[in-house]
C-alpha cells in the first residue's frame, strides 16, 4: 500500500522470506488495490488544495493543467485511454503503480467504476511479472 514501492517491492521481499508465491501475490495485489477507490475521488481535491499553497502551488497547478489538456484530447478515445492506463500500471517500475494510475485517472476525469478495473488488471499483471523476475533473481543468488 506504500506509494512508489507498492507490490514491486513487496513481492520480492515476500518471496525471499520464503512465503509461497500464491500467498505473496494475493496479499500484495489486494493490499495494492485497497487505496485505489479512495484515491481516485479524493486525489482531485488534494490537487486543488495543493494548487492554493504558496510555495508549491505552481507544481500542483502545472499537474492540473496537464490533466485538463489530456481530458480535452481524450474525449473520443475512451477504450484507448483504459488500455493505456492498464499498460502504465502493469509496467513494474517505481512510480507506475496503482497510486500513480489513480492520479492519472483523476486527471483524466475517469470515475472509479471505469478506472478501477484497468488499474486492478495492471496491478495483477505487475505482480505476476515481479514474481517471475523474483524467482529468477533468487534462483541466481541461491547456492
Image (tube, helix red, strand yellow):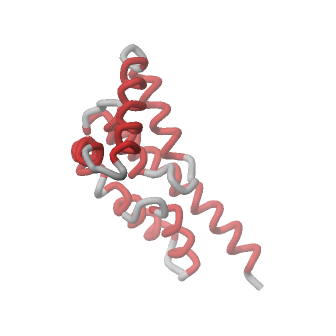
Q: In the displayed structure, does residue 114 sit left or right of residue 80?
A: left
Asked if 108 appears above or below 93 in the picture, the reply is above
Which quadrant holds the C terminus?
bottom right
Q: Position of residue 4 (x, y in %)?
A: 47, 59
Q: Identify which residue is drawn at 34% across, 55% down.
A: 33
Q: Considering depth in this image, is 44 or 92 the residue closer to the camera?
A: 44
Q: In the displayed structure, does residue 44 sit left or right of residue 8?
A: left
Asked if 28 appears above or below 83 in the picture, the reply is below
How many marks the image carries: the answer is 0
Which quadrant holds the N terminus?
bottom left
Q: Identify which residue is drawn at 70% across, 66% down.
A: 136
- Quarter occupied by residue 114: top left
Q: Identify which residue is drawn at 51% across, 41% down.
A: 88
**Residue extending farthest top:** 76
Asked if 4 appears above or below 135 in the picture, the reply is above
Q: In the displayed structure, does residue 94 sit left or right of residue 75?
A: right
Q: Position of residue 22 (x, y in %)?
A: 47, 66
Q: Considering depth in this image, is 69 or 18 the residue closer to the camera?
A: 69
Q: Identify which residue is drawn at 53% across, 75% down.
A: 13
**Residue extending farthest bottom:** 143
Q: Position of residue 85 (x, y in %)?
A: 45, 36
Q: Position of residue 63 (x, y in %)?
A: 40, 39
Amino acid at each position: 500500500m506504500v506509494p512508489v514501492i507498492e507490490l514491486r517491492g513487496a513481492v520480492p521481499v515476500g518471496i525471499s522470506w520464503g512465503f509461497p508465491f500464491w500467498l505473496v501475490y494475493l496479499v500484495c495485489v489486494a493490499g495494492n488495490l485497497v487505496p485505489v477507490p479512495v484515491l481516485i475521488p479524493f486525489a482531485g481535491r488534494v490537487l486543488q488544495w495543493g494548487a492554493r499553497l504558496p510555495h508549491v502551488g505552481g507544481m500542483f497547478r502545472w499537474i492540473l493543467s496537464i490533466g485538463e489538456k489530456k481530458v480535452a484530447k481524450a474525449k473520443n478515445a475512451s477504450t484507448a485511454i483504459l488500455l493505456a492506463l492498464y499498460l502504465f500500471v502493469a509496467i513494474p517500475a517505481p512510480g507506475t503503480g496503482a497510486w500513480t494510475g489513480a492520479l492519472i485517472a483523476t486527471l483524466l476525469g475517469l470515475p472509479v467504476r471505469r478506472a478501477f478495473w484497468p488499474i486492478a488488471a495492471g496491478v495483477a499483471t505487475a505482480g505476476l511479472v515481479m514474481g517471475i523476475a523474483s524467482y529468477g533473481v533468487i534462483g541466481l543468488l541461491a547456492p
